[in-house]
Amino acid sequence: MRFLDACARRPTDATPVWLMRQAGRYLPEYRAIRERLSFIEMCKRPEVACEVTLQPLRRFDLDAAIVFADILLPLEPMGVGFHFAPEGGPVIEQPIRSGRDVRGIRAIDPRSELDYVMETLGLVRRELEGRTPVIGFAGAPYTLASYVVEGGHTRDYAHVKAFMLEDPATFARLMELLAEVVAGYLLAQIEAGAQAVQLFDSWVGWLAPYDYERLVLPHVRYVVDQVRGHGAPVIYFANGASGMLDLVGRAGADVYGVDWRVALDRAWEQLGDVAVQGNLDPLALLGPPAAIEARVVDVLERAGGRPGHIFNLGHGLTPQVPPDHVKFLVDTVHRLSAGARR
Ligand code: CP3
């Protein structure tokens, strides 16, 4: 299978492609289900989550599925209640900002407490019958910490940074707890059928390299060390981190996701001998086909036919994107990369 071959840096007949957030509101068939159910209800009903996972695969020739879930789901059983505000953003009911708060939350048993995700993975595997591999995922410790400390979306990450600076020991305890939960959650997903797993570190791009290296990276390494060697490649996506890829590359992952703010060949040089996933600007999909194609050509040229390139966006698909443009993208990647291998 192209996607798993590329993760292992084996040559493929064309560049594999999947897209972060490939299931979601840009698809009318997603919105039809979403009209009846809240996002969390969709995640918690395995037959619905399975259906939504498969929707993009019916329309587009994607080389991987990603299970429909969310990075925030483990927070609820940990004791961190949250909901999605009507405008869309997550809201943490009681942000974690002190030693007392950290002592009040706990590790989880993902097999029983997130059983619905495991069940969805089993259903997806059964439906796909080995034709397309399925990716499981989790949020990386810092990205989850930024949600639980900030209480939701933020412009400046002031609360989480203040916590990190004022009480590094308690912050480290929070990070250790999150790392433990995330590692267990990814291992449970592999056991339930995930053939690769991705760690989303969506908000590390706001950290200085000094803090990332000392206070964040060791926890990412811990998760990757726990999860690697269980038969599923580990992908680490550090969004916005193009200024510190030398550090990111020390995470120990099999595959590194790269955002769109850096040229792919320059990113690859810094990451070294690994597989690389990326990195079209997700909003390039708003443009007409010729504009999309020019940018796909650039990414493929920079990948240079090296084994180990997985085509993806530099971040998630957005709700405004026309599905026809997504189809054009997937087909164009396959067409232009077929037979162009070194
Ligand atoms: O197709 C896929 O990629 C699988 C599904 C998936 C979702 N969330 C579904 C979702 C994945 C991989 C995620 C990861 C996720 N969730 C991340 C990391 C990736 C990234 O985008 O940086 C983050 C930061 C979250 C947290 C989150 N979930 C936010 C901030 C929001 C609200 C913003 C928004 O887009 O509405 C969500 C909700 C969410 N997760 C939706 C979907 C399809 C939209 C829910 C809806 O229908 O209203």
Image (cartoon, grey):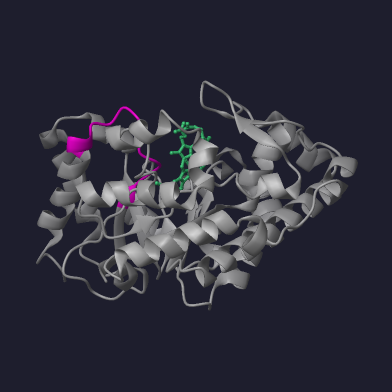
Residue 250 horizontal side relative to residue 316, left or right: right
Magenta portion: prevailing SS class? loop
The quadrant of the rendering that contains the N terminus is bottom left
Quadrant for residue 224, please give it.
bottom right
* Residue furthest to the right: 100
Residue at image location 32% in from the left, 59% down from the top: 64
Rendered image quadrant of residue 220:
bottom right
Residue 111 appears left or right of 191: right
The relative height of residue 137 versus residue 253 in the rendered view (above or below) is above
Residue 287 lies in quadrant: top left
Is 317 placed above or below 270 here?
A: above
| Magenta span contains residue 260 | no
Identify the image quadrant of the C terminus: bottom left
Q: How many marks?
A: 0
Residue 275 locus on image (x, y percent): 37, 66
Q: Is residue 218 visible?
A: no
| Residue 280 image point, x, y percent | 30, 44
Residue projecting furthest to the top? 87
Q: Residue at x 50, y 36 (%)?
A: 39
Measured as percent of width and height from the top left, residue 324 is found at 17, 36
Residue 318 in the magenta stretch? The answer is yes
Q: Which residues are magenta?
A: 312-325
Q: Residue at x 58, y 67 (%)?
A: 188
Asked if residue 266 can be seen in this view, the reply is yes
Of residues 224 and 192, which is closer to you in this image? 192
- For image coordinates 54% across by 68% down, the residue present is 252
Where residue 183 appears, as percent x and y from the top left, is: 63, 64
Q: Is residue 283 left or right of residue 213?
A: left
Is 163 situated above or below 267?
Answer: above
Work out whether residue 203 or residue 37 is closer to the camera in this orientation and state it.
37
